[in-house]
Amino acid sequence: MIDQNALKDRIAVVTGASAGIGRAVATTLAHHGAGVVINARRAHKLRELADEINEKYPKINGKDPCRTVQGDASEDAVVELMLDEAADHFGSQPDLVVVNAGRGLSGSVMTSDPGEWEEMIRTNLLGAAKLIRAAGQRMVELQKSREWPGKPADLVVIGSTVGRHISPFSSMYGSTKFAVNSLAEAVRRELGPKGVRVTLIEPGIVASEFQGVAGYDPGSFGELMDRISPVLVPEDIARPIAFVCSQPAGVHISDILIRPTRQDYP
């Protein structure tokens, strides 16, 4: 457990926040005192979450604790708008960015729909890289203005167990997560010496909308989830993210892999 105000004075941006892990992360960060800017494609879902957070948690310097930026997180203009909105609304550059937006795809290189490949790669890899780059540049400049060790700056990247242990049944999706996992570690080595923590979170099977959007067969996947139940829920991923980001600036938990206890593979 961490203190409810452990993230007070932190300014966060969370992509893919309309459901699942992103929604849970945004709510958890706000619960622990952070101001949050949330992004997703579905404007009505964002508005619902923002209203919930703004009604439940106190204002920050007289301003609502949650703001929304609707749009595709792989577009350059949307990436910059999210970061600008955080700086403009809360009065300082964001220092806690969760790179979460992504999508799955059922099937292997041989069996998945090739018509879905480009969008998935654009969302999962290129979108993540764009946000990591833009946020990382701002955080480096932010940390230059702070006495070290002072306040932490965190880039949290959502990978996957299949980005470490490949599954032949979702190998196209897994390939994007292998890339994201590698990117996170490379950026950690680059930005860590500059005072910016880059943390990779690798979830196992989490019950959410993700499986349906990815096109997984509800029968066979449902049998897998029943066999290893209870599977993870989004809050199980949000809690360790809050814990990681609450550590003193000189302490970095760089990689967390989280599985349901009975998940043997992948």
Image (spheres, rainbow, N blue to C red):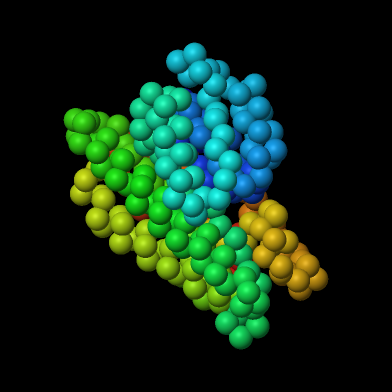
Vertical position of residue 171 compared to residue 142: above or below: below
Q: Is residue 263 left or right of residue 177?
A: right
Query: Which residue ends up furthest to the right in the rendered image?
Result: 219
Residue 16, placed above or below residue 118: above
Answer with the quarter of the image where residue 211 lies: bottom right
Q: Quadrant of residue 23?
A: top right
Q: Residue furthest top?
A: 62
Residue 9 sits in quarter: top left
Can residue 29 be seen in the rendering of this structure? Answer: no
Return the x and y of residue 165 as percentages of the image width and height.
50, 73
Which residue appears farthest toward the bottom when viewing the image?
Answer: 110
Reply above or below: 76 against 27: below
> Which quadrant: the C terminus?
bottom right
Q: Is residue 218 left or right of residue 129?
A: right
Quick check: can you spot residue 115? yes
> With respect to residue 264, does 123 lie above or below?
above
**x, y (%) of residue 216?**
71, 69
Q: Residue at x 66, y 33 (%)?
A: 47
Q: Residue at x 36, y 32 (%)?
A: 93
State the residue in front, 197 or 134. Answer: 134
Question: Residue 249: image x %, image y %?
Answer: 29, 38
Q: In this image, 219 relative to 241: left or right?
A: right
Residue in the picture at 46% in, 39% down: 81
Q: Residue at x 24, y 38 (%)?
A: 141
